[in-house]
Image (cartoon, rainbow, N blue to C red):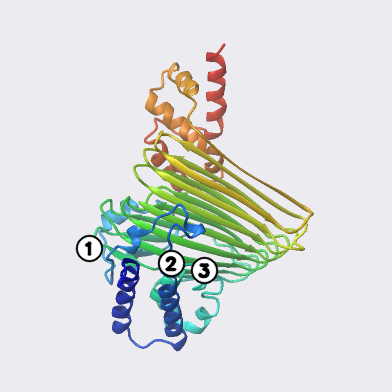
Amino acid sequence: MSDVQTDVQRFLDRLAERNASRGPEPTWIAARRQAGAARFEAMGFPHRRVEAWKYTDVRAIARGDFTLSDDASFSPATAAALTLPLEAHRLTFVDGVFAAALSQLDDLPKGVSLLPLSQALDENHEAVGGPLGRLTGVEFSPFAALNTAFMEEGAVLRLAPGTVVEKPIILQFLSRANAAPVMSHPRILVEAGARSQATVIEHHVGEPEAANFTNLVEEILLERGAILTHYKLQEAPLADLHVASIHVEQGRDSRFTSFNLNLGGGLVRNDLITELNGQGAEAHFNGLFYGQGRQHVDNHTLANHNAPHTISNENYKGILDDRAHGVFNGKVVVKRDSQKIEGYQSNANLLLSDRAEIDAKPELEIYADDVKCSHGTTTGQLDEEAIYALRTRGIDEQTARGLLTLAFAGEVMEQVDLDAVAERVELAVAGKLPERFNLAGLVETAAALTDTSGE
């Protein structure tokens, strides 16, 4: 048996062990598990000869010997330190296992249903089974197939038509430092009814010594006029492995705003896709990825304009230090007869080290003629003159570099409305700064100082 077959078989053996320990479950769930396992076995783990995985080597995952956890225990003090300090509705998972003691679900407003997937399936599995897998099936990728095969826990969020949720809804995933590495395959389903509004924060974080594998699939369905702001704050431990697919379906006049903020994880792959299916639908993708050491962060995005009069706007920033490697592949597809659309895409990258690398590939695929589309990517380094100008004003070099690095991220961070999220990003990117400051003014100030110093 080849090494590749051995890697695949190891995961299938874990699945067989898990299936043997399960109780009875609905036929459709068993059938989907079987379909996921069969598809994963047929595809195997992706390799770098596959175009979509050209720059990302997943052997660290394929060769890992991961177990599955049934333990949701976690130090309350450690959890409190890792948790975002926000008044929020919260579902918490530890290594993929629902942690009721670390969740806050007591004051959900009328029109909101937020349940762990296991409970939602127990209470009404037929209602969950219809939309689950509609957007991300087993054909999407080997990891989606693997998630389907192991699918047992996650979150189901439903918003009734017209519901406006004032507090953020946090889906918190904690990674624990275990004696042996574990894997989890969370499944998230969000159904936002017509004209509903909410903010969802997906937060991945853990104990510094954790070294686990998370393989997440998330499906978001927005009905007419629904407005959803989605934060993905990924600050997993540096030895964690993280693969995620987020697939969105947008109805008429819906608005989806994504903040994809990647700070942690040793190997990270994100796929973010939206289907703009109704006229007036808008999608706004804001991304920031920060890598240091030997981190590898791969972001693939896709906006499918399937209907006329739709808008997509994407702005991704990459900051890479040491020997970190970043990948950005953003694609906008305008289908035939999808006239009067706007599709904008921008990617800018900052390399803080001569050994850091970025592979960027923005793409447009247009089959209509009455459109406004643009794309572009740039890569550069910090302006040494601006650093010098700040230092002449009494700012030490480390702080000056931190300020300018954060200023580079400012175009994305200015859109973040939650201080607790922004502070996590600022601390990771720039370190502890002397005081809060106006990001919008940093670039202008540094430029003005540079101009003055050059006179």
Q: Quadrant of residue 347?
A: top right
| 455 shown above or below 158 | above
Q: Which mark is residue 180?
A: 1
| Left-right relation of 431 to 68 | right
Q: Position of residue 404 (x, y in %)?
A: 47, 30
Which amino acid is tagged 3? Answer: Phe
Q: Which mark is residue 140?
A: 3
Q: Residue at x 66, y 58 (%)?
A: 333
Crowding at label 2, few (<14), some or many (≥20) Cα neighbours within 10 Å?
many
Which amino acid is tagged 2? Answer: Phe
Q: Nearer the viewer, residue 163 or 303?
A: 303
In the displayed image of the protein, which residue is found farthest to the right?
370
Q: Considering only order in the chain, which callout, 3 or 1, is on the residue closer to the N terminus?
A: 3
Q: Which mark is residue 143?
A: 2
Q: Which mark is residue 399?
A: none
Q: Nearer the viewer, residue 69 or 172?
A: 69
- Kindly indicate whether the residue at mark 2 contacts the one at mark 3 (C-beta within 8 angstroms): no
| Secondary-structure class at tag 3 | loop
